[in-house]
Image: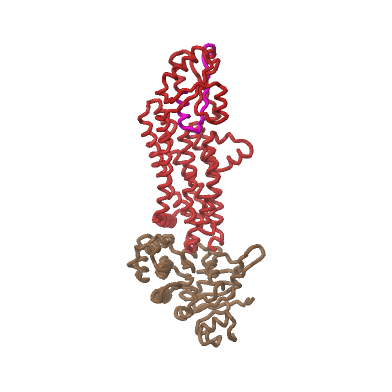
């Protein structure tokens, strides 16, 4: 079997890995952090979203409406909405003119505004399709939920009465995107995974130097690459703990949404579950991608830690360098396809290796990815990991490492 | 700068030999610091050699070159007949180092510190524990073997470190200030252990210290370094005689600070 130059996988490496893990597992705060950070993040998000589900499924909202169509279908739709205000959780149905509506849009005081346009009936009669317009303040959970209820209800009314005709809603998307739950998974997996290895890497490299344990370690009959790889493996095994608790955290998150959605009508329950929960079948891929992110974060951390004077400096620089780009691209993940950005900004975003973790997760979770694109994402991240490990190994070989 | 070099004929089989060993550290683009200046010496198997010198004299640099942590700028160094720049893997299997500011893994127990370190020399686990038992008995820490060392005093930690450096049963042991911070009884235990290693097991010991009594008690020979130069090498009594000094301290002070006038 071929092996990397300078690495002899043997009992010596195993002893070093054991030493690293034993020492780390006695650091209660470090272990506590690795367990609590994913569980807390997911639980908090689950509780927050279950609150959102509760708000949007029991709290009524006022809906503004403009009926311009004088034909049969516009009036039918209006009267159906009016007579179903209670199940639709509409507190008040307020008639306004288009001018009033536009004014509220401009003032940003609008919650939900339904427009049944002038040609609504005519379009349905002649083209078998028509368009109803809904304006919604998406910053308001209740308004968004109310708009969604009206949308579903309007389609059901038209479909029920006019069997051969249909109220169509056109969805415009560039590429298929993940659901909110999956966008959230991407964001949380990214942010916390990038930062999780920082304490270990700082402790294991800069910390060894600061504690004056490195010099004796470098004299043992192991190549420095073997020492580096052993520490890398120990780091991965340690962060495996973090990954396992991420899966547990996702379980808690899904459970908290399911509990809240359980009492809702079947259609609403299905809607909320699909929107917010994470499909358990995708968890192995999330886990795999998380390990790639952790490996990359550790390799970057090794480089930083080999240059830093002490553990505190290593952790500070590590957090600074990793947190900012990850936050940026993590948030971009919520704004739609990360591939939509052009120009220099687009190139910058694509050059960040963690962007490819988002692309990978987004592609997998939305089902839009091809095998080749996924392989490309994995190869890009692994390529960066290898480059950083080589740089880390070179830095680790320097005489100054013991200075 | 004094560029005089010393070449000492060892008593028996030579295990360490340096030839014009020089180490220059670059500090910035223009400044250079000569840490070792053409140092030549030979050390025989089973010898206990003390390296004396003020801080920054080059003692630690010399040891670091001999264990392959630093590369010489010029000259050559051989350990067990192998060039340190070419066959360091062979050398490292057979030597051990207790660094000057050696840290210890605070969250591991005394036994774990010894066993894990020995494991990295490829020693089987059962044998490692046998050796750890023996070493812990010798340094008097058997009763505390399962305590994490973070609660130990500085002297107790130093004893664990001495034991740790001996667990691989090295042919040559480099000890950079082994008894610093150790109480009187502990220091006595460590010295006796080193004496035994040298006399009974023919281990070669190179140690640095600031304690001249320790040198007199332990060392067959002493090398005095000053500003990177090896300014004197010999048996303590021979040096006293050579420099017509009442004791080793006078020899040391004369060579390092210029107090007194010596004829070589």
- Image coloring type: by chain
Pick the front one: B163 or A181:
A181
Instruction: Please say if A242 is above or below B261.
Output: above
Which residue is located at x 51 percent, y 53 percent?
A: A315
- Quadrant of the image containing the C terminus of chain A: bottom right
Rendered location of residue B111, percent (x, y): 37, 63
Residue A281 visible (yes or no): no
Pick the front one: B148 or A166:
A166
Which residue is located at x 61 percent, y 39 percent?
A: A345
- Image quarter for residue A395? bottom right
Rendered location of residue A108, percent (x, y): 55, 31
Q: Colour of chain B?
A: brown
Q: Magenta includes A138?
A: yes
- Magenta segment: A125-151
Instruction: Please say if A273 is above or below B88.
Output: above
Q: The red chain is which one?
A: A
Rendered location of residue B151, percent (x, y): 38, 64
């Amino acid at each position: 079997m071929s092996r990397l130059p300078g690495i002899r996988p043997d009992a010596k490496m195993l002893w070093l890995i054991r030493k690293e893990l034993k020492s780390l597992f006695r650091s209660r705060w470090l272990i506590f952090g690795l367990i609590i950070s994913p569980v807390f993040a997911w639980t908090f998000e689950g509780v927050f979203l279950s609150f959102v589900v509760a708000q949007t499924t029991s709290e009524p909202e006022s809906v503004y409406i403009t009926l311009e169509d004088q034909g049969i279908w516009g009036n039918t739709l209006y009267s159906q909405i009016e007579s179903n205000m209670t199940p639709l959780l509409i507190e008040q149905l307020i008639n306004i003119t288009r001018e009033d509506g536009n004014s509220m849009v401009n003032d940003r005081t609008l919650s939900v505004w339904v427009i049944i346009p002038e040609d609504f009936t005519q379009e349905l009669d002649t083209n078998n399709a028509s368009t109803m317009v809904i304006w919604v303040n998406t910053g308001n959970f209740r308004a968004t939920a109310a708009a969604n209820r009206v949308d579903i209800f309007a389609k059901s009314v038209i479909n029920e009465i006019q069997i051969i005709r249909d109220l169509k809603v056109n969805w415009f998307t560039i590429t298929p995107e993940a659901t909110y739950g999956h966008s959230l998974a991407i964001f949380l997996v990214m942010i916390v995974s990038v930062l999780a290895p920082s304490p270990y890497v700082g402790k294991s490299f800069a910390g060894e130097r600061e504690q004056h344990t490195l010099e004796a370690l470098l004299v043992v009959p192991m190549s420095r690459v073997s020492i580096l790889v052993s520490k890398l493996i120990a780091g991965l095994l340690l962060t495996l703990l973090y990954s396992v608790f991420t899966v547990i955290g996702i379980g808690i998150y899904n459970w908290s949404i399911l509990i809240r959605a359980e009492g809702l009508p079947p259609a609403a329950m299905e809607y909320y579950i699909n929107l917010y929960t994470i499909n358990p079948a995708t968890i192995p891929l999330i886990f795999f991608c998380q390990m790639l992110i952790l490996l990359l974060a550790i390799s970057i951390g090794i480089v930083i830690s080999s240059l830093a004077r002490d553990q505190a400096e290593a952790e500070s620089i590590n957090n600074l360098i990793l947190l900012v780009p990850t936050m940026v691209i993590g948030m971009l993940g919520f704004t739609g396809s990360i591939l939509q950005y052009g120009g220099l900004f687009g190139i910058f975003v694509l050059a960040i290796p963690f962007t490819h973790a988002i692309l990978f997760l987004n592609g997998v979770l939305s089902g839009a990815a091809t095998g080749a694109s996924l392989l490309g994402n994995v190869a890009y991240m692994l390529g960066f990991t290898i480059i950083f490990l080589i740089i880390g190994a070179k830095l680790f070989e320097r005489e100054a490492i013991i200075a | 700068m004094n560029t005089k070099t010393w070449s000492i004929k060892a008593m028996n089989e030579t295990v360490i030999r340096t030839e014009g060993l020089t180490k220059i550290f670059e500090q910035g683009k223009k400044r250079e610091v000569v840490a070792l200046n053409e140092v030549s010496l030979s050390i025989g198997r089973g010898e206990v050699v003390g390296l004396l010198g003020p801080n920054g004299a080059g003692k630690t640099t010399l040891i670091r070159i001999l264990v392959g942590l630093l590369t010489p700028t010029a000259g050559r160094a051989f350990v067990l007949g192998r060039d340190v720049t070419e066959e360091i893997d062979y050398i490292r299997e057979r030597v051990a180092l207790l660094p000057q500011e050696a840290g210890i893994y605070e969250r591991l127990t005394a036994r774990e510190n010894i066993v894990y370190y020995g494991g990295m020399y490829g020693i089987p686990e059962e044998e490692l524990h046998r050796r750890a038992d023996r070493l812990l008995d010798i340094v008097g820490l058997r009763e505390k073997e399962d305590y994490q060392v973070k609660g130990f005093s500085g002297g107790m930690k130093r004893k664990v470190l001495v034991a740790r450096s001996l667990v691989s049963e090295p042919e040559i042991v480099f000890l950079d200030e082994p008894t610093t911070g150790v109480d009187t009884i502990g220091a006595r235990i460590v010295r006796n252990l080193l004496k035994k290693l040298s006399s009974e097991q023919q281990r070669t010991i190179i140690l640095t210290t600031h304690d001249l009594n320790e040198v007199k008690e332990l060392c067959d020979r002493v090398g005095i370094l000053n500003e990177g130069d090896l300014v004197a090498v010999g048996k303590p009594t021979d040096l006293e005689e050579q420099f017509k000094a009442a004791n080793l301290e006078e020899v040391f002070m004369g060579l390092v600070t210029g107090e007194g006038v010596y004829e070589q």
